Each structure stands twice: as structure tokens, then as C-alpha cells.
Image (cartoon, grey):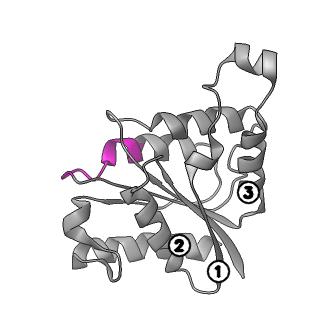
Amino acid sequence: MKKIVAFGASTSSNSINKKLATYAAQQIKNSNIKILDLNNFEMPIYSEDSERLSGIPKEAYDFKEIIKEADGIIISFAEHNGAYTAAFKNVFDWISRIEKVVWYNKPMFLMATSEGLKGASSVLQMAYNRISRGNPNQIPYFSLPNFSDNFNQQTGIKNKDLNKKFIDSLSIFVDSL
């Protein structure tokens, strides 16, 4: 049974990206799914001074251990002003200080969604460019525009063309596990 870690890169209590990441993970048969909430990994804003004075926070080590134990990682990115959320960037900054290979070269599936026409594609491209650098795996990605129009909590992605793109991308991820 494969261990899948999934999370929305947001701290919103009603995160549409967490919903999309959870849905994607639930589509993987014979898997043990762990859904993370970035609110459980709140840390001081990363700075060299903070690291020198207080060291790396326990929450960073906890997050990194969960990633280490996973067979695959699913992240759905929220877009704040065209970039990562501050919460995700902070977790990313802290865990990058623990080991050079941040995501352990695990198979990953990157997604993003928003209520807009672009489906948070700017942050998704940014994330893909950074996370795929040095990762030997093919990293599929998927953007879901107009979340409320295109997603149903029970049935999933309503638009047939978008659903096909999702399934194709998810299949690449599953095949790499």
C-alpha cells in the first residue's frame, strides 16, 4: 500500500486547494492517504538570524519527516498575488535548511485551482519550475480554473475535458509510485 501525502498550500480553513489535493489523493487505489494542514506547521518567518539564534523549529523537522515517509506527494497551490502563499513559502524555506534535497526526489503531482479563469496557473508554473529542478521524476501538473463551476465535492471534476487532463496527469503520478 503506497503512502500518499497531500495538502493544499494554503492556511484557509475552507481551502479549495486542500479540497482538490484531497480529491486527487482519494483517486489513488490501494493507498494510505495523509492530508496535511499547513496550520499545523506554523513557524516564525524564516530568516538567517532566526535560524542562528533559535535553530530550525520542530515543526519543520516534523513536516520533513512526514515527507520522508511518503511514497508520493500531492500539492495543490493557492495563488496569492501571483506567487506562493506566505505559509507555504515559509514551510518550504525552513525545510530546505534541513537537507539539500527538499522533497527527497519523491514522485509528485502538482496542482492549483482558483475561482478565476487561469486556475492559479502562475503559481503552478512557478512551483513546477522550482520543484522539478533536480528531481529525476517526471512531475505532472494540473490547473483547475473556475473551481466552483468545475468541481463537485462528491463527483469531482465536472468538465469532461478538464477531467481527462486531470486523469492523464494523475496517471503519470500513479505510474511513478
Q: Which circle marks residue 25 in the picture?
A: 2
Sequence-wise first label, 3 or 1 = 1
Up-down relation of residue 135 to residue 106 (above or below): above
* In-image side of 152 versus 166 (left or right): left
| Image-quadrant location for residue 42 | top right
Q: Hey, which quadrant is residue 112 in on the image?
A: bottom left
What is the x, y in percent for residue 78?
Answer: 39, 47
User: Relative to the observer, which residue lies in front, 99 or 21?
Assistant: 21
Tell me where residue 16 appears, x and y as whole percent.
Answer: 36, 59
Lower position in the chain sequence, tag 2 or tag 3: 2
Gap between marks 3 and 1 measured at Cα: 15 Å
What residue is pinned by disc 3?
Answer: 66
In the rendered structure, which amino acid carries the disc numbered 1? Ser
Q: How many other residues sit within 10 Å of disc 1, few (<14), some (14-19) or many (≥20)? A: some
Crowd class of label 3 (few under 14; some 14 to 19; many from 20; radius 10 Å)? some
**Amino acid type, label 2:** Ala
Tag 3 secondary structure: helix
Residue lying farthest to the bottom in this orientation: 30
Q: Amino acid at mark 3?
A: Ile
Question: Does 58 sit left or right of 25 as displayed?
Answer: right
Judging by the rendered image, the residue that carries numbered circle 1 is: 31
Q: Are marks 1 and 2 in contact (CB under 8 Å)?
A: yes
Q: Bounds of the magenta span?
A: 116-125
Do the CB atoms of the residues marked 2 and 3 lie less than 8 Å apart? no
Residue 124 shown in magenta:
yes
Camera-nearest residue between 134 and 38:
38
Badge 2: how crowded within 10 Å, few (<14), some, or many (20+)? many
Secondary structure of residue under mark 1: strand
